[in-house]
Amino acid sequence: MNTLKMAVPALVLAAVSGLSVAGEKEELLKLKSTTESLIKQLVKQGVLTEDTAKGMFKQAEAEAAVLAEQAQTKAAINNAAATGPVDAAEVRVPYVPDFVKEEIREQVRTELRKDVVDDVLAHAKKERWGITDALPEWTRKFKLSGDIRLRYEPVFMANDNSGSLGVFPYYPNGQAINESGGSQNAGLDLIRNTTEDNQRFRERVRLGIDADVVEGLKAGIRLSTGNLRDPVSTNQTLGQTGQHYEFNVDRAYLEYNQTDSHGFNWLTLAGGRTKNPFFVGGGEFTSGSELVWDTDLSFEGFAATYRYNLGEQKSIGDGARLVYATAGAFPLQEAPFSSNDKWLFGGQVGLDWGFKNNDNLRVGVAYYDYTNITAKPNTTFSGTCDLNTRENTASMPEFLQGGNTLASICRDGAFNDAILSQFPGMVGLASDYNIINFNMRYDMALFNPIHLTVSGDFAKNLGYNKNTVAAKRILGGALGSGAVDEQTNAWQVRADLGWLRVDKKGHWSTFLAYKRVERDAVLDAYTDSDFHLGGTNAKGWVLGANYGLLDNLWLTSRWLSTEAISGPAFGVDMLQVDVNTRF
């Protein structure tokens, strides 16, 4: 610290440029003491290292010496010019009025303070003193984010619900049948719960890391709670007797964005396990439509989006006017020793049109083509699962929620059993799914920031073949029994009123939706996992609201009232109360 004490006067000298008026000595000493105390505190608190301070004061000493020499030379020249030749024996004492001295003193004091402060701030900015991101450059390429949701969810079954029709249940649990190795092994899990009320507490935790690799290229990873075998839910049900939660890789992807000379993002390329690349009619809080895709679903594969700017805006969002086209290829399931892998191919074209009054219209038309997803029944003389070919077994879906028409792939039991079971030992999809989807969303900024948003969604399965489904479907315990009632349409209408984002204290929004999803309109595995407990063959209402309790903390309440479209009575009411936070 001795070096600091010696350097402080040098800093003062640099600021006053060599001035040494005797009447200002007291002021200079005060300033010296203040400056020395400031430097000591900076070093003591770790904001400024002693080495950095030493270097700064060495530079100040050098600058002070130069400035002092220049000031003395200039003063001598000015004095000689003003007084003219002076006799060697003559002594002159200039008179300076007191008010002039006071003005000079105040001016020096002001300029001195300013010079010292400016010098310290300049060094602080250059050396990044006390700045939170004063870390190695590579650390500034990462962005950490996350959210936590706590949910209370009671479920109420209608009093007149019934789960069976004939020998085989009308509402079978296809997932349990396939996981258990047959209908008989599934036991009590063979039938979906349609009669017993229940309530549960659930939690969702998500943690994401985004990294800027190079300009335009981003790598992203997101971890989340949830069931490893459930692609449409990231919930963890509380009450696991203290067991640890499952924490899974929800997303892992590379994303490249290309902008033009005006800053317009005209191209996006993504690969890996990514977010949904298709427009679904809503934002983060409105959630859009889950008619075709559940909001928790991640897509595995590759997607590209091209945008053409129709206006002068430089960014996508309110006021933008553009058309876009998105295409993607997503592997669903690999079939070992076979070329019949399951794939999803999708494409969408759309319009994003912003109005001068801050209204916004978005429209999208999409087509989704699933390949090799239908059941391939075992055609051996007994049809039992032990005689399956690889092709038969590979046609079994890895995940089902319920609602789609099912087909038996093979029978329970073995080919040498005395009596062959009529129950399926493995089930798959009776219909193919090639879906056309139309989405529309109109956002009206009525009393900005209060918005009224109306949206509509329609989907139809063009891959449904009435004769094919009738030949192999399961209904009431028999194959191919009963007439086929084609149900291939799905639609939803929704209205939202309030703030577009409810992540600030006091912000609010409400929403109301009606939805009808017929049995084979969409793939039940990927549609909404909450509406009618997940899956298709359901219709009903959704009413809810969001309210910001604090910044980044909000409450969501939602009431879902649904019933089955066809089959025995199956009505479900559900309440969801969520506390959400993000960081």
Image (spheres, rainbow, N blue to C red):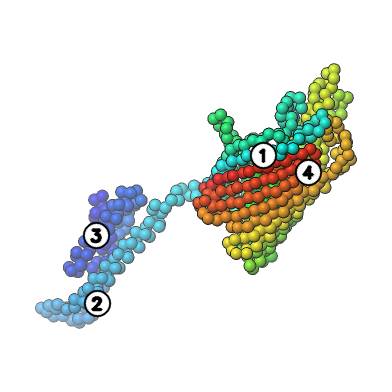
Q: In the image, what residue type sits under mark 3?
A: Lys
Quarter of the figure with residue 190: top right
Q: Which residue is mark 3?
A: 32
- Left or right placement of residue 285 versus residue 64 in this view: right
Q: Which residue is mark 4?
A: 565
Mark 3 vs mark 4, foreground winner is 4
- The disc at residue 156 is 1
Query: Alpha carbon of mark 2 to alpha carbon of mark 4: how far?
Result: 102 Å
The x and y percentages for residue 455 are 70, 56
First reached walking from the N terminus: tag 1 or tag 3:
3
- Within 10 Å of disc 2 (Cα), the crowding (few <14, some 14-19, many 20+) is few
The x and y percentages for residue 166 are 82, 31
Query: Alpha carbon of mark 1 to alpha carbon of mark 4: how far?
Result: 18 Å
Q: Which residue is mark 2?
A: 78
Q: Evaluate if marks 2 and 1 touch, with contact meaning CB atoms under 8 Å apart.
A: no
The x and y percentages for residue 508 are 57, 55
First reached walking from the N terminus: tag 2 or tag 1:
2
Quarter of the figure with residue 574: top right
